[in-house]
Image (cartoon, rainbow, N blue to C red):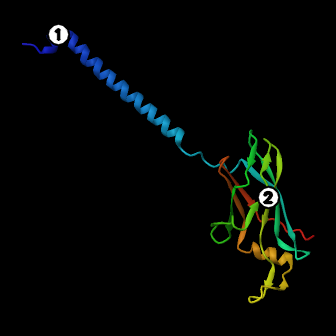
């Protein structure tokens, strides 16, 4: 006695065809899933795309009560675009302070602001300016009047006493930019 498959050879090919079709469908579904998963992963930040070439810092003055008075510091950086693509660093790029104690990154966006979007052509250099709102005045706690104003160089040293620089994250271009503690230029 034989089995049903031996008597009807077309059944054998039907079973083989169904198994092959199911295997092919599973393989195609796995490939589609893998491609979708891979393409939906967040892009890695490139920390080598933009590098610092030069920096300086100076006192930033604003008119107050008819006179120019200290308002903070302006940090200027010359940046090198090391990529084959133009990069525009937007005004809303995240600025963090790199603390010397453990290299911890602390949010600095309440103090440091990018002055304008910065355009860097491919393999070219451009200037980035950050304004830091940092007071150097010693105020009377009751009246709010200025008692004394600290020397701008000493005030700048105090502003960066716990830090060795800044780190900027440009989420639009997936770029991380390390900015060193700038050299203070007395004007």
Residue plotted at (27% across, 18% down): 16
Residue 145 as seen in the image, left or right of residue 178: right
Tag count:
2
Task: Give yes or no for contact between labels 2 and 1 (Cβ–Cβ under 8 Å).
Answer: no
- Packing grade of label 1 (10 A; few <14, some 14-19, many >=20) is few
- Packing grade of label 2 (10 A; few <14, some 14-19, many >=20) is some
Where the C terminus falls, by quadrant?
bottom right
Residue plotted at (82% across, 68% down): 73
Looking at the picture, how far across and down is residue 64, in whole percent?
87, 74
Looking at the picture, how far across and down is residue 10, in whole percent?
22, 10
Q: Earlier in the sequence, mark 2 or mark 1?
A: 1
Q: Looking at the image, which is closer to me, 25 or 182? A: 25
Q: Which element is circle 1 on? A: loop
The residue that label 1 is drawn on is 8
Q: Looking at the image, which is closer to me, 132 or 47? A: 132
Residue plotted at (15% across, 12% down): 6
Q: In the rendered image, which quarter is residue 24 located in?
A: top left
The correct choice, above or below, for 18 with respect to 90 in the image is: above
Mark 2 or mark 1, which is nearer to you?
A: 2
Residue plotted at (14% across, 9% down): 7
Residue 159 as seen in the image, left or right of residue 2: right
Q: Which element is circle 2 on? A: loop
The correct choice, above or below, for 138 with respect to 13 in the image is: below
Residue 40 as seen in the image, left or right of residue 106: left
Looking at the picture, how far across and down is residue 47, in whole percent?
68, 51
The residue that label 2 is drawn on is 115
| Distance Cα–Cα, label 2 vs label 1 | 82 Å
Looking at the picture, how far across and down is residue 15, in whole percent?
24, 18
């Amino acid at each position: 006695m034989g089995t049903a498959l031996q008597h009807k050879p077309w059944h054998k090919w039907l079973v083989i065809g169904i198994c092959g079709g199911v295997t092919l469908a599973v393989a195609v579904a796995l490939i589609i899933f893998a491609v979708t998963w891979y393409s939906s992963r967040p892009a890695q930040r490139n920390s080598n795309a933009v590098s610092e070439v030069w920096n300086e810092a100076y006192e930033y003055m604003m008119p107050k009560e008819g006179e120019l008075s200290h308002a903070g510091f302006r940090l200027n950086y010359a940046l090198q675009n090391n990529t084959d693509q133009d990069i525009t660093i937007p005004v809303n790029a995240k600025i963090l302070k790199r603390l010397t104690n453990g290299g911890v990154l602390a949010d600095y966006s309440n103090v440091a602001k990018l002055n304008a979007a910065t355009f860097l052509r491919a393999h070219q250099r451009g200037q980035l300016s950050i304004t830091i709102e940092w007071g150097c005045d010693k105020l009377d706690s009751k009246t709010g009047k200025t008692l004394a104003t600290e020397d701008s160089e000493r005030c700048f040293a105090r502003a960066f006493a716990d830090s060795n620089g800044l780190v900027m994250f440009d989420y639009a271009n997936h770029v991380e930019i390390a900015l060193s503690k700038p050299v203070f230029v007395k004007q």
